[in-house]
Image (cartoon, rainbow, N blue to C red):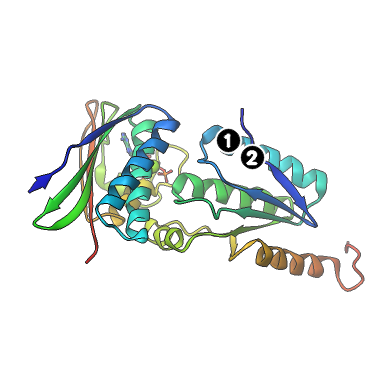
Amino acid sequence: MAESAADVLPIRSGDDIVRVRQQVRIRAVAAGFSLVDQTKLVTAASELARNTLDHGGGGRVRIESVDLGGRRGVRLTFEDEGPGIPDIARALQDGFTTGTGLGLGLGGAKRLTNEFSIDSAPGKGTRIVIARWKSV
Amino acid sequence: MDRIPILKMGDALLITIQVDMHDRLAIALEDDLTQKIVQTRAKGVLIDISSLEIVDSFIGRMLDNIAAVSRILDAETVVVGMRPAVAITLVELGLSLTGVKTALNVERGMTLIGKRVATIRGPSGRERG
Ligand SMILES: Nc1ncnc2c1ncn2[C@@H]1O[C@H](COP(=O)(O)OP(=O)(O)OP(=O)(O)O)[C@@H](O)[C@H]1O
Ligand SMILES: [Mg+2]
């Protein structure tokens, strides 16, 4: 599996979320994504970046371009050292929120991507990996 | 602090969202809009999102809030100019935007609001009640 250099961007403010969206868009375009696929990945990234900031107390995202035997994609790893997610299944349910949101971000990001995994422990933090592949 | 301008267009208010919204800007917009609706007795609010490349749950919630507040003040919200890729993505995200009408562009949005005003005012053109 060939991987090009990864970018790591901080997520500490609303402006950082804007930068994350821009960088993810650039990678999606470079991977040859259609406009709809770009939009889906950037939207998922926006949801997870906001969660990292609002619920995780800030963190970072690693952005990688992936090439799996000619199949191109973009993988994003969001990490924070915040409170963690005690009940992941529940957090993934649409409408579940501990804040003032709609509770759509996590479930939505999962639907908008081809790969989705959460690793979280109370008190330690959260790591969420998503990937989307170019549609054939 | 930056603010999103609100323009009066006939019986409606027009808001064009061009910048990347963040929390403070969204809250300021909701406040400004509430005042403006009361001041101008607008019957409709058009929100032009044609320059937005994505709509996430944060923007979705803002649009929902605006629609809810406007409804209480007897104005109807019409979101105009949503890009097709954004519309497709919204469905998968699970954002239904209930209570928000949509129109292709500002002109069609104005027509929707015009119809509503005509129903409220009746044939005489005067406000009922
Ligand atoms: N990085 C994180 N750290 C800690 N908790 C998180 C994190 N991400 C999500 N959560 C928890 O999962 C819940 C659901 O997240 P989700 O993004 O689906 O909804 P939301 O952020 O509350 O609202 P919305 O995204 O619709 O604005 C959050 O309310 C929060 O309790
Ligand atoms: Mg969220």
Mark number for residue B4? 2
What amino acid is at disc 1? Leu
Q: Which residue is mark 1?
A: B25
Residue A128 vertical placement versus B109 (above, below): above
Label 2, residues with CA under 10 Å away: few <14, some 14-19, many ≥20 = some
| Residue behind label 2 places its C-beta within 8 angstroms of ligand 1 | no
Q: Is residue A34 above or below residue B1?
A: below
The disc, 2 or 1, on the residue closer to the chain's N-terminal end is 2
Q: Quadrant of residue B98?
A: bottom right
Q: Does the CB distance between marks 2 and 1 fall below 8 Å?
A: yes
> SS for tag 2?
loop
* Residue at (54% x, 41% y) in the render: B19
Does the rendering let one see residue B92? yes
Q: Is residue A10 left or right of residue A2?
A: right
**Most foreground residue, B114 or A64:** A64
Left or right position of B91 against A26:
right
Q: Chain of mark 1?
A: B
- Percent x, y of residue A111: 30, 56
- Ligand 1, by image quadrant, is top left
The image position of residue A114, as x and y in percent, is: 22, 56
- Amino acid type, label 2: Ile
Task: Give the numbered dot on residue B77.
Answer: none
B49 displayed left or right of A108: right
Q: Position of residue B120 (x, y in %)?
A: 81, 66
